[in-house]
């Protein structure tokens, strides 16, 4: 079967001056992740590689480019999940780590736990030799300028999903063996309380992967996503026979109706069906399958580029 990889760069009202860079960023990350699949790598390796690329890109709210909390600090959340085994690793509120997704993978592979938080996550990182970086190395000029405007968290939420700010990255993949995986990484929402954990690192909310149904990575207002367990809700609809696109639309619609939350999701099924769906103004996403790169930013936009083999 053909391998597929899909990424998102966050569902929010991406301003025009970041639109091009967001689209270029997701295209590059999708191609980078797909190169891993093409070389025979697993879905798990591919989603980690794609998310690492997005974490390195200051346009996105993850790793370098993360949103700042009320103290002006970076606190990062991430999850990775392997659909073969339901193996899962997550970190929350970690500081000074350039690639939280890789630390999440280390939690999955090197500990008996699913999630480590805050100081414990940083102590674990130190114990396995993960280098820390100064906070300022992760903060972009744009984020520091926006943070200095000193708006409240709720004003940020309104801006995030109706006007301007930024949200989360993620990837889902299915490899040639039919194994699925997901990864999600975020700086959270600007001016969040110190210690606030959003949906991204929470299993079944910011992401889920199961070879029996598919893999999902979510983005959007974390408190809303947590309340409806968005990733698992999407997979429940798939289990009941919906297509990946229908399942995503139903679950996002439910989140809008039930808790007035907006967001987005990328999904891939074990048979290679995929979708990128959102209820915000924009979401940068890209997908690679069968030598074709698909991408979009606006609702219902689906552009296509043939990749050289
Ligand atoms: N969706 C990311 C967050 O709310 O933290």
Image (spheres, grey):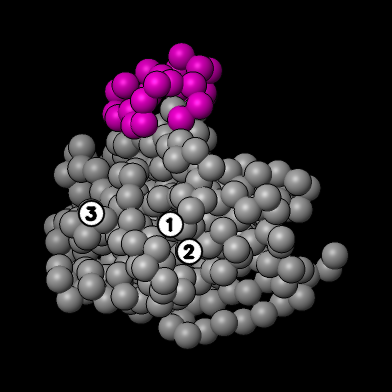
Residue 8 in magenta? Answer: no
Image x and y of residue 3, in percent: 68, 59
Q: Quadrant of residue 230?
A: bottom left
Residue at 50% from the left image edge and 26% from the top image edge: 109
Disc 3: which residue: 226
Could you say whether the residue bearing mark 3 is in a helix, strand or loop?
helix
Q: Earlier in the sequence, mark 3 or mark 2?
A: 3
Some atom of ligand 1 lies within 8 Å of the CB belonging to the residue at label 2: no
- Name the quadrant of the N terminus: bottom right
The residue lying toward the viewer, choosing from 58 and 304, is: 304
Residue at 62% from the left image edge and 82% from the top image edge: 303
Magenta span: 108-133
Residue sitting farthest toward the right:
309
The residue lying toward the viewer, choosing from 164 and 263, is: 263
Q: Earlier in the sequence, mark 3 or mark 1?
A: 1
Disc 1: which residue: 217
Could you say whether the residue bearing mark 1 is in a helix, strand or loop?
strand
| Left or right: residue 80 compared with residue 156 | right
Q: Distance between the Cα atoms at labels 3 and 1?
A: 13 Å
Image x and y of residue 87, in percent: 46, 36
Image x and y of residue 66, in percent: 39, 49
Could you say whether the residue bearing mark 2 is in a helix, strand or loop?
strand
Disc 2: which residue: 267
Residue at 14% from the left image edge and 61% from the top image edge: 154
| Left or right: residue 130 compared with residue 248 | right
Residue at 76% from the left image edge and 75% from the top image edge: 306
Q: Distance between the Cα atoms at labels 2 and 1?
A: 7 Å
The residue lying toward the viewer, choosing from 149 and 176, is: 176
Asked if residue 294 can be seen in this view, the reply is yes
Residue sitting farthest toward the front:
240
| Left or right: residue 162 compared with residue 184 | left
């Amino acid at each position: 079967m053909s391998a597929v990889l899909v990424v998102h760069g966050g569902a929010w009202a991406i301003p025009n001056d970041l639109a091009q860079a967001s689209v270029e960023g997701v295209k590059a990350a999708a191609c980078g992740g797909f190169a891993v699949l093409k070389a025979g790598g697993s879905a798990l390796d591919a989603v980690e590689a794609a998310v690492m690329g997005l974490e390195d890109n200051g346009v996105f709210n993850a790793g370098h480019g993360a949103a700042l909390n009320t103290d002006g600090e970076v606190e990062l959340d991430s999850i990775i999940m392997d659909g073969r085994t339901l193996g899962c690793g997550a970190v929350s509120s970690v500081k000074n780590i350039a690639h939280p997704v890789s630390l999440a993978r280390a939690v999955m592979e090197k500990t008996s736990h699913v999630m480590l938080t805050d100081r414990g996550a940083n102590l674990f990182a130190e114990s396995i030799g993960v280098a820390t970086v100064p906070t300022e190395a992760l903060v972009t000029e744009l984020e520091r300028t926006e943070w200095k405007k000193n708006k409240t968290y709720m004003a940020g939420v309104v801006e995030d999903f109706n006007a301007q700010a930024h949200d989360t990255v993620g990837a889902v993949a299915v490899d040639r063996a039919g194994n699925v995986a997901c990864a999600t990484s975020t700086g959270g929402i600007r001016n969040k309380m110190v210690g606030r954990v959003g949906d991204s690192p929470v299993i079944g909310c910011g992401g889920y992967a199961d070879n029996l149904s598919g893999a999902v990575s979510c983005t959007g207002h974390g408190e809303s996503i947590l309340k409806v367990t968005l990733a698992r809700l999407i997979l429940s609809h798939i289990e009941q026979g919906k297509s990946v696109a229908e399942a995503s639309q139903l679950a996002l619609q439910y989140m809008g109706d039930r808790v007035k939350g907006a967001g987005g999701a990328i999904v891939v099924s074990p048979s290679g069906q995929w979708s990128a769906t959102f209820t915000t103004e924009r979401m940068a996403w890209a997908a690679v399958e069968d030598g074709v790169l698909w991408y979009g930013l606006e609702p219902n936009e689906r552009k296509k580029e043939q990749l050289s083999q």
